[in-house]
Image (tube, helix red, strand yellow):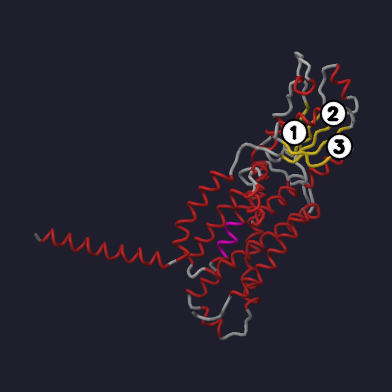
Amino acid sequence: MFLANSLLNSLRRIKAITTKEIRQLMRDRITFGMVVMIPLIQLLLFGYAINTDVRNVPVAIVDQSNSALGRWIVEAIKVTQVVSIESHYTTAREAEDAITRGEIRAALILPPNLTEKLANKETLGQWLVDGSDTMIAGAIKQLRHMPLDQITGIKTEVPPTFEVALFYNPEQRSAVNIVPGLIAVILTMTMILFTSAAIVRERERGNLELLITTPIKPLELMLGKIFPYIIVGLIQMTIILGLGNIIFDVPLNGDIAQLLMGTLLFIAASLTLGLIISTIAKSQLQAMQMTIFIILPTILLSGFMFPFEAMPKPAQWIAEILPATHFMRIIRAVVLRGGEISDMRFDALWLVGFTVIGIIIASMRFNKRLD
């Protein structure tokens, strides 16, 4: 009898604590929202936005033959839906420069003697491909063998082929593509996580009481919170690229100054996003939950794991909002293709604008009051 009463009382206490936790969770709107939104976002991202079937790869055509055969070949390539022809150039050099700038992922070069090559059953042309993205390169390589009857309507035993030249990563090693992208992912995780708890930590430790009595302005506080972590971000970038070069032989084809400039722009944007979160969250737990909510789309939509071109338009619109998407383009352009910030001016200006607007928003939201 005694054991039964003791067990009953224990169950009552457990029920009381459980009821209290449920009510507290329901009052915590941010935590309750994360419980619902995180699985919902993952379901939508993996089920709708993420697509490993590469389609609509932006490419250019350099048709030096100016022939009907060249136009037939271009139309046959369009039908595959693997590529999307974005532009036409007159020389291969122009196409190579466009690949370096990130405007296109590949270019098809058709020589002047195209008809003669067809008559002799020779290779008809050449694909110049940005091999830094192995999935994109694999999709383009599928086009190297096109049956002749698909182009001319004439049956033949020997199908025409295209040569494929892979720039920047001819061996198609995945590490060459992953390591630079990993910088964007790790900096996103650490920079946002560190600063998202910055203001919240001051409030929880009681340091905000001291700030009330000081003449410090909200903007000064925001900038003071950002500067120490800039050094942390540069150290992390150096570690990743240094070890990536030593262990995985990842090349550094770009200028160090260009790399530092692009990294600083992204660090500033990420830290600003973290500060905005810190002005919204009421506790460090909430700040961490909101950080995870940002990190998931960053990893999945920024182009780190899946080609940006393979995503549907709505997913691409969401990805364009994320700072990591723009930095992913910059870091791969500089490190792998030897590009410059001026080649990626749109992405650089977007990061600058995001930082400025973010600091203004965070400063307006910050209030040196305990409530």
Main secondary structure of the magenta stretch: helix
x, y (%) of residue 42? 52, 49
Q: Residue at x 67, y 48 (%)?
A: 180
Of badges 3 and 2, nearer the viewer stands: 2
Residue 91 vertical placement versus 199 (above, below): above
Residue 54 vertical placement versus 144 (above, below): below
x, y (%) of residue 49? 59, 46
Label located before the other in sequence (3 or 1): 1
Kindly report the distance in space between the C-alpha atoms of the residues bearing marks 1 and 2.
13 Å
The local crowd at label 1, few if under 14, some if 14 to 19, many if 20 or more residues have their Cα within 10 Å, is some
Kindly report the distance in space between the C-alpha atoms of the residues bearing marks 3 and 2.
15 Å
Q: Amino acid at mark 2?
A: Gly
The local crowd at label 2, few if under 14, some if 14 to 19, many if 20 or more residues have their Cα within 10 Å, is many
x, y (%) of residue 96? 82, 40
Stretch of the chain drawn in magenta: 188-194
Q: Amino acid at mark 1?
A: Lys
Image-based side of 129 in relation to 189, left or right? right
